[in-house]
Image (cartoon, grey):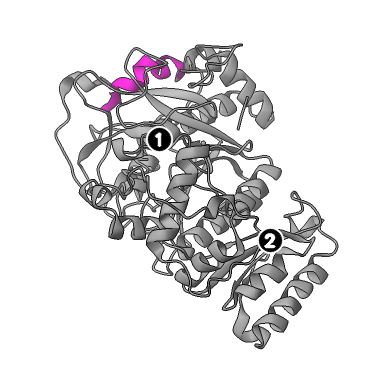
Amino acid sequence: MKKSVFLLAIFFALSSCNTEGLQNENPKTEMSQKDPLTAKQINEGINTSIKSTGSFNWSKQSDHFLWSAIFRGNRMASIGFGESKDDFDRSKSANNKDMEAEILSVLKKYEGKDERTILLASDKYLNQIDVIIESEETINALRQMKTLRYLEPGDYHYFENENKYNTAARSSSSGSSGCGFSSTTLDAADYTSTTPSAKIPWAFTKHNIPDAWNYSTGAGITVGLVDTGVSPDQTLLGNSFNNGASSGRTITKYGVYNADGAADQCGHGTKMASVMTAPRNNAGLPVGVAYNANLIAYRAAANVVLDTSSEQTAVKTAFTELGNNTAVKIISMSMGHIFSVGKIEDGVKYAYSKGKLIFCAGGTSTSFTSFVGVIFPAWMPETQAITGVKEGTSNQKCDVCHKGSEIDFTFQMERASGNTVPVLSYYNGQADYVGGSSVATAATAGIAALVWAKNPSWTRDQVLNKMRQSATYYPTVNSDYGYGNINVLKAVQ
């Protein structure tokens, strides 16, 4: 079964606008129109494709449509090359230098510029480059090359444009980034207490996580988090990460986005780090699923909607670096996009090829995106797609969660009261709630850490199979909810 958070209270509405047949054109056929399409026209084409076919792919668009999006995206293009669709790893690609040189020679020929003004970046680990393209003729020439795996806009801001041109999207844009710095007093019904003085979120009990702690607490396992970073103002995810019943572990933070450090400037990543690995100590605050696991957190985006070149490149970098880190067993990312991004796809495949078990959010949005199914990269076969469901169910999605045939597991995160999962706040000594497929994903990654810690010699597939065997619908998957909820006690016994 396979093939995707707050993701996406996404800024767009269903579009019934006429896209002038752009979706049906032969990708190799050049148009007589010389002016680039407007950003509004491009977004309409994307929306119509998703609405009518369930997906959008740049490779299926005309040269003019693709060139227009590149033009509207600061002329930046992302190119993946290789001798086959799976030839993405430079270390396993004997001809990678020759293939890159051939692509650059075509660019120089049709752009009429020196390589130094065309080539923006060449990835160290992947067969992928970022370039500047001015001419539509260049698009046509590149698409004739047998070694071209993909050619995409490198910096087309779909969500920004949708928010600009779509009135309905603007009305739903608040909170769309998944960011927030709030704190709140937790309802006493939403947690139980455990020694030495920590709060167990209600959702953990529903999945038998507290009982599973008698067998495994995640010790010895390192989890990688790709998100918006971790708050510098939350000491339980800083200097106090390694204390109490959570002694003997480490937290490491990296910043690969925008060159301004590892500190969370959104709030989303802090909450994901909390639900996975917050310590069990005497602070009187919510504990994480794998409270003895190590955490490596990457700040790879400004928010959960991976709209810009800098975010997409940073996410790619995070996945390749985590892939190369032999200590890392599990990667969790509660961010994404509504259509595929080639360089991120390459990064995910690279990490997967290194044996990592990858969990991604199935998608979270408002009613304006109800026609969108499981999001990217959760729909990829290399990832486990997770969505959130209501308390006491395994087949009733949360009010803003996505569902679909690509979903692998579910996690109960929404109560009848509307309350979600208690976590640490951005600020020290405070708590908050978090919901959607985001928290479901991070919690499930924490569950995987418990299973792997109990069986440290196991492979990724053995861990995954044990999780499946311990879930609601095993051995027959549900058409929209995969294997359903995991009984974590059963998974670690």
Q: Is residue 202 magenta?
A: yes
Give residue 3's position: percent from left, percent from top. 60, 33
Residue type at the position of mark 2:
Lys
Mark 2 is surrounded, within 10 Å at the Cα level, by few (under 14), some (14 to 19) or many (20 or more) other residues, namely: some
Point out the frontmost of discs 2 and 1.
2
Q: Is residue 491 left or right of residue 354?
A: left
Q: Is residue 471 left or right of residue 166?
A: right
Of the image marks 2 and 1, the number of the one nearer the N terminus: 2
Determine the residue positioned at 39% across, 53% down.
Answer: 229
Give residue 331's position: percent from left, percent from top. 54, 42
Which quadrant of the figure contains the N terminus? top right
Q: Is residue 229 magenta?
A: no
Give residue 258's position: percent from left, percent from top. 42, 68
Answer with the quarter of the image where residue 38 lies.
bottom left
Which quadrant of the figure contains the C terminus? top right
Q: Which residues are magenta?
A: 196-212
Give the SS element for disc 2.
loop
Mark 1 is surrounded, within 10 Å at the Cα level, by few (under 14), some (14 to 19) or many (20 or more) other residues, namely: some
256, 116: nearer the viewer: 116
Give residue 477's position: percent from left, percent from top. 57, 16
User: What residue is disc 1 on?
Assistant: 371
User: What residue is disc 2 on?
Assistant: 28
Spatial distance from mark 2 to mark 1, Cα to Cα?
29 Å
Q: Is residue 248 visible?
A: no
